[in-house]
Structure formats: C-alpha cells, structure tokens
Image (cartoon, grey):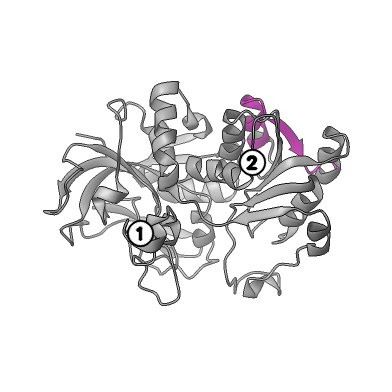
Amino acid sequence: MKAVVYEGPRKVRVATVPDARLERHTDVLVRVTAANICGSDLHMYEGRTDFEPGRILGHENLGEVVEVGAAVDRVRVGDMVCMPFNVSCGFCANCENGLTAFCLTTNPEPGRAGAAYGYADMGPYEGGQAELLRVPYGDFNCLVLPEDARERQDDYVMLADVWPTGWHATVLARVQPGDTVVIYGAGPVGLMAAYSALLRNASGVMVIDHHPDRLAKAEEIGAIAIDDSVSSPVEQVLELTEGAGADRGCECVGFQAHDPEGDEHPSMTLNNLVKSVKFTGCIAVVGLFVPTDPCGGDSLYRRGAVAIDYGTFWSKGQTMSTGQCNVKNYNRQLCALIHEVGARPSWIVSHDLDIDDAPEAYARFDARDRGWTKVVLHPGKPG
C-alpha cells in the first residue's frame, strides 16, 4: 500500500509499504479515503519529537471498513467510519470514566497513558495517511457515520481530532451562553475552538494571530480577528472588553508559539491568556506541550518547563485546565450536528489532495504559506 512515511526532519515521502492487516480478533481494517494533516504532525515533521524514521504519519482518519475481526460485533464491512485519534481499549478505568486520551492499556511504554495513530511516544500504532489502517478495538474506536458520509467526507473527517479538540477547549474553559471568549491561535484547532464557542452561543469570540489568511477565516464565521503584529494582543482584548478581560480563554498554539517577528516563546500564549482573561476566569490549554524538547532554543523548555506568570494567575483566581482531547466524549454529538443541523466544519479546509502530494503539502503547511489552513489527503475512494 502507499503511505506517507517520516524520514527525518522536514523529510517525508510516499512509499510502498506492507499492507496493514488484522492482528487481533477485535481489529477492524479500514480503506482510508480521507486523512488530515494536523498541525501537531508538524512537530514531528520538524524533528522536534522522537518520532522514528520509517513510521507512517496520520491520526485524523476516515474510510470504509473492508475487513473485521472475528470478535467484532457492531461494525460491518462497507460501513463508513471515522476514528478518534485516541487508540483506546474501552475497558480500563480511564476509558470507563470517559478519559480515552489517557487509556491505561494501549500504550506499552512504562509510565505513559494514552495512545494514538502515527504519533511520537503514543504507542506502536501506524498512522492513517495510507491506503489501509488497522483499527484496534474496532467496535469501540470506530464511529459509524450516517449515509451521507461518502459525499461529505471533508466534514466528517474533522471528527477524528480537530473539531473535538476545538470543542474540548470550550468545555475545559467552561464556555456558557453570553460569555466572551479569547482564543490564541488561528490555526485549525483555534478556528475550530472559535466555531465551537459560537455554536455554544458565546456573545463575542476574539481570535488572535498574525497570519492574515487565517484571521480572515475566523472573520468568515463572525469571530473578531485580532492581529498581534499591530499592537499588544492583551491591550486589544482589554479594550474590547472595557478593561475587564474575556470571560474564557483558549490556548490553541502550544509550545512552538512564535511572536510576529518569528521568535519562539513556549510560555508566550499562556502568559498572554493570564493577562487577557478576567479575574476568576477559566483558561483551557489544548495546544501541544511536551515533557522534553531537546531541539528547542528555550533552555527552560528543553526539559518541558515554562516560566508562567503564576503570581498573576493566582492573584486573579483563575482556573486552568489542560490535556489531550477525549474524542469519544464529543464525536457522536458533533456528528449529529453535521448530519442533523447542517454544521460545516469543512469550512477550514483549504486543500483536498491526492496522497502523492503529501511531501509538498507538508512543506507548504509547515511554512504557513498563505492559504494553507487545512489539508485533507485522499489515499483512496470508497467502494
């Protein structure tokens, strides 16, 4: 099968590799028809993680079931399914409590919880930027999609990660109707957080970035675009909120946050949020932070630490919640919003490409080239 294989920093290629296959009776085999390139894939692409050369990338996957294991009861051959990026068992203590991003059984590495397809330090599972994908615990990990999935793949594939993660940000931030929300980052997750906050009836959603094309996408849905290259984003938020600060804040950038001049500051967005959110406000952090960053330029963050303005955070009585998204908590209800209500998360998609275009797509997306907001690869077509 064809697959997008990592070869080293800023090097991926489309290679012919052995077909994915069933390995256990609980597995499902999926012919992948849509696989997103995620912003967090870029951390591996840039060599900022310990992702091994030769592995297949891709954790936002959708496709058609072509084979099921003998112990699979619910999923059928021919079903169109979307898989949470979390590879989870469904029966450990964390999974039973809905914490599927922190499954206790699927990552064999000692001292780790949580697994994912094609991702550094998250188990041995190959990614789905390939023609075939093995899905462990298929009955639990496959969301069977409605009958319009074949025609609306760009909407439904967003259920694998990017939309649930954006929604997760609004849940962690406790967004309520009428709240004002500030979101740092207008990448795919930040845009999905803005979309989610508006669906949750926030009264005003401010999105901060310095890429004009991404800020324009935020404005398309009625969010307020704030360009942090013009003036201090904190001052702009305070001005828009009459000095009080936003009720809720979402960090959707992560440890590779850059200022408008291009310099990297792992703690920048966290500290800006502390200053931008009101006294007693809630902050959600869904941008990726890692325990170690040996290739990073920040000496503190090389060991996973950031210099947060904790005194200000404490004195303001704020709450901060964080962690990877437990996709299964949200993907079924968000699927219903697509199918029943007409939600269109595919609004963020800028490019639908063949799998052979993956090397160029990674390079263009990583460079933040104008207009490259979200890429969907199509390894194959449903039968």
Q: Assess whether residue 319 is covered by the magenta stretch.
A: no
Q: Amino acid at mark 2?
A: Ala
- Which residue carries the number 2 mark? 186
- Which residue carries the number 1 mark? 56
Q: Residues within 10 Å of mark 2 (few under 14, many from 20)?
A: many
* Residue 153: image tag: none
Q: Is residue 179 left or right of residue 347?
A: right
Which residue is painted at 55% across and 39% down in the image?
373
Camera-near label (2 vs 1) is 2
Task: Say which element carries label 1.
Answer: loop
Task: Tell me where the magenta segment starts and ends, as one range.
Answer: 214-231
Labels 2 and 1 touching (C-beta < 8 A): no
Picture coordinates of residue 174 (x, y %)?
A: 63, 43
Q: Is residue 342 left or right of residue 199?
A: left
Residue in the foreground of this view, choosing between 190 and 273: 273
Cα separation, mark 2 vs mark 1, equals 27 Å
Any part of residue 314 in sight: yes
Q: Is residue 262 left or right of residue 41?
A: right
Quick check: 182 above or below 134? above
Q: Assess whether residue 222 is covered by the magenta stretch.
A: yes
- Quarter of the image that includes the C terminus: top left
Mark earlier in primary sequence (2, 1): 1
